[in-house]
């Protein structure tokens, strides 16, 4: 009986220590320098690329200022490549000639925010300027392949989990606006991300 009570007391003490251990590892200041990367599925759902998708990636870095223990706001710069999506005939969804593939990549500069829901979970948001370069088919009766570049905008949101005070993983949705001269390469990306803060 004494051994059972001793085991129960040790187990109870261990269970009480678990929240304290997690609380010690929880971030107390969510500001500072960061780098992150995303890899995921890109999609274009309009024009000659309707229902097309590929794999894309993004790399970002920046700095966040902590305004409260659970809210930080920062600036970021980055680069992305949103893949090559094959154009399709809008009447029968057959692939068209290989040069009809889209190509979109560019640089981003904007603001980002983190709202901690708990020591482990957070919501994120981002928006800013998108300086892009791409190739794509025009949305005309007789489409032609054009090379274009311009400045536009991007925006996104996500949810993440802090593995440690410096490392987190997340799921994100981002939209990159890229339209010019009847070519619409605007792309959605759903991605997994990893971030390191230092």
Image (cartoon, rainbow, N blue to C red):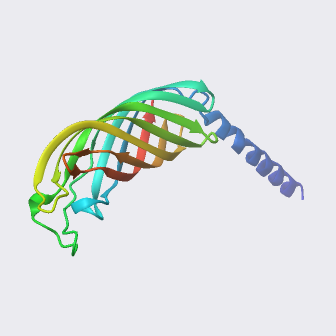
* Left or right for 169, reference 154: right
Q: Is residue 71 above or below residue 102?
A: above
Residue 174 in the image: state x and y as whole percent: 39, 47
Q: Is residue 19 above or below residue 48?
A: above
**Picture residue at 21% right of the left edge, 62% below the top:** 48
The count of marks equals: 0
Q: Quadrant of the N terminus?
A: bottom right
Residue 117 in the image: state x and y as whole percent: 63, 42
In the picture, residue 67 is in which quadrant? Answer: top right
In the picture, residue 68 is in which quadrant? Answer: top right
Front residue (pair 190, 142): 142
Residue 150 in the image: state x and y as whole percent: 22, 37
Q: Residue furthest bottom?
A: 92
Q: Quadrant of the C terminus?
A: top left
Residue 98 in the image: state x and y as whole percent: 10, 62
* Left or right for 188, reference 183: right
* Left or right for 36, reference 143: right
**Picture residue at 58% right of the left edge, 27% below the top:** 29
Q: Is residue 59 above or below residue 137?
A: above
In the picture, residue 52 is in which quadrant? Answer: bottom left
**Picture residue at 11% right of the left edge, 53% below the top:** 145
Q: Residue furthest right?
A: 1
**Picture residue at 84% right of the left edge, 57% below the top:** 4
Front residue (pair 22, 133): 133
């Amino acid at each position: 009986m004494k051994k059972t009570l001793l085991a129960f007391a040790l187990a109870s003490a261990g269970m009480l220590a678990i929240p304290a251990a997690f609380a010690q590892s929880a971030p107390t200041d969510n500001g500072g320098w960061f780098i992150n990367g995303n890899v995921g599925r890109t999609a274009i759902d309009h024009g000659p690329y309707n229902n097309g998708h590929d794999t894309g990636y993004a790399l970002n870095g920046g700095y966040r200022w902590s305004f409260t223990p659970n809210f930080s706001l920062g600036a970021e710069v980055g680069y992305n490549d949103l893949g090559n999506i094959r154009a399709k005939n809008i009447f029968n969804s057959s692939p068209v000639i290989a040069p009809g593939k889209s190509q979109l990549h560019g640089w981003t500069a904007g603001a980002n925010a983190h709202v901690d829901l708990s020591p482990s979970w957070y919501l994120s948001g981002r928006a800013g300027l998108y300086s892009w370069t791409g190739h794509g088919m025009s949305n005309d009766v007789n489409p032609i392949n054009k090379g274009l570049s311009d400045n536009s905008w991007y925006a996104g949101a996500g949810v993440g989990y802090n593995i440690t005070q410096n490392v987190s993983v997340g799921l994100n949705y981002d939209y990159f606006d890229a339209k010019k001269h009847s070519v619409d390469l605007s792309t959605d990306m759903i991605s997994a991300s990893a971030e390191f803060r230092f």
